[in-house]
Structure formats: structure tokens, C-alpha cells
Amino acid sequence: MLDAALHELLEHGYDKVTMLAIASRAGASKESLYSWFGNKEGLFRALIVRNADASAARVKAALDGGGDPYETLVGYAIGLLSLLTSEASVALNRGSMSSPALAAILLESGRFRVGPIVEAYLGDLHEQGVIVAPDPAESFQLLYGLVMRDIQIRVLLGEDPPTERQIATAARSAIDRFFALCEAD
């Protein structure tokens, strides 16, 4: 059902997606969709949460890997840029803009869930003397800003998403700047 909803979203945009079309694509009844999700917003809420669960798990696994902190953060930055400029993420973000309830769940499931994972990692790096980050939440905001810049908003507004190579270059540049700003003595 959720895969069908995502395909419909990608093809038609949130405002034009119907429960009937999703049910038809999923080979289910419209009544089943309403029974399981309540309404279209509930269905898309479940889709957002599913995507956020997968993203949080990937971030946690990447940061728990115990590798070189610089390369770990480059990998995080590549993953973040790839995720937030992906076709699915852009479509979900655009759809959430028309629904305050979906926007709230997107923030709660995404930024407010993943942010603390990264903040904890940055706090650990501070404790180890790798970076100077006495306020991990502030350090995360700095990191996020350096990584994302205006890339996601430009894609949301219709620019083509960056290529893998552009993402890798932007990620490495962002982490270079982050380490320059947060360098330990």
C-alpha cells in the first residue's frame, strides 16, 4: 500500500493522488485503505514515518560504525544530500507543504528524530577531543547548514537534483569547512 502511495505521489503530486488510485495500484480495496489508514493524510503519515524509520536507522548505523570521524561525517553528508534531494523526499516535502499535520510529522519523524542522533555523535567527538563542540545541538545546526546550504530548497523549487559526483563534492567541502570551524587544538 505504501509503495503504491509513493508511486502515485511521484506520478501525480499529493493534491492529485486519490485513495481509489492508490488502492487500484496496490490491488486492494479503497475500503481497506480507509480501514488501515483512516484517510489520505493518515496514509501519507505512515509513508513519511516508514521513510524516516529507514533514514534514522541508516544514520545511526553509519555513525555507530567506529570509523574515521572525518570520513564518517562525509558519509553522513552524502547520505543526507542524497536523501533530501531524492525524488521521493522532494515529493513528500512538497506534499507536506499543503498539510500542516503532514509537515509536523515530517519534522518530528525526520529532523527532530535524526538530529539528536547526530548531536550525540558530535558530542562524543567533542569528548574525545576530535572537534570543539561544547554545544552539540548548535554544532549540528552548523553541520546541517554547511551540508544542505540551499541545495534542497532549489530542488524543491524545480532545479534538477545534484548528481552523485556533485553530492560527493559538496559533502566533502562541507565537512572540510566543519572541521576547519570546529578544529580541536
Image (cartoon, rainbow, N blue to C red):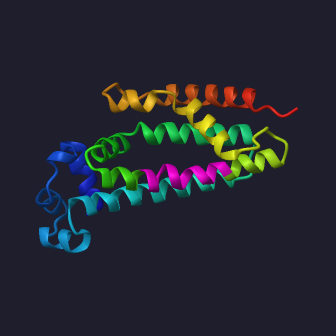
Percent position of residue 49, x then y:
40, 59
Percent position of residue 110, x then y:
47, 51
Q: Which residue: 44% across, 40% down?
A: 84
Q: Which residue: 18% across, 73% down?
A: 32
Q: In this view, does 168 lie above or below 26?
A: above
Magenta portion: prevailing SS class: helix
**Between residues 168 and 128, which one lies in front from this camera angle?**
128
In the rendered image, which quarter contains the C terminus?
top right
Instruction: Tell me: 126 left or right of 151.
Output: right
Instruction: Tell me: 41 left or right of 56.
Output: left
Residue 114 falls inside the magenta stretch: yes
Q: Which residue: 69% across, 27% down?
A: 176
Percent position of residue 45, x then y:
32, 59
Magenta range is 107-119
Percent position of residue 154, x then y:
38, 26
**Between residues 164 and 151, which one lies in front from this camera angle?**
151
Q: Which residue: 68% across, 31% down?
A: 178
**Between residues 9 and 141, which one lies in front from this camera angle?**
141
Q: Is residue 61 above or below residue 96?
A: below
In the rendered image, which quarter contains the N terminus?
bottom left
**Between residues 172 and 157, which one lies in front from this camera angle?**
157
Q: Is residue 22 above or below residue 145?
A: below
**Residue farthest toward the right in the current orientation of the protein:** 185
Q: In which quarter of the image is residue 172?
A: top right
Residue 31 falls inside the magenta stretch: no
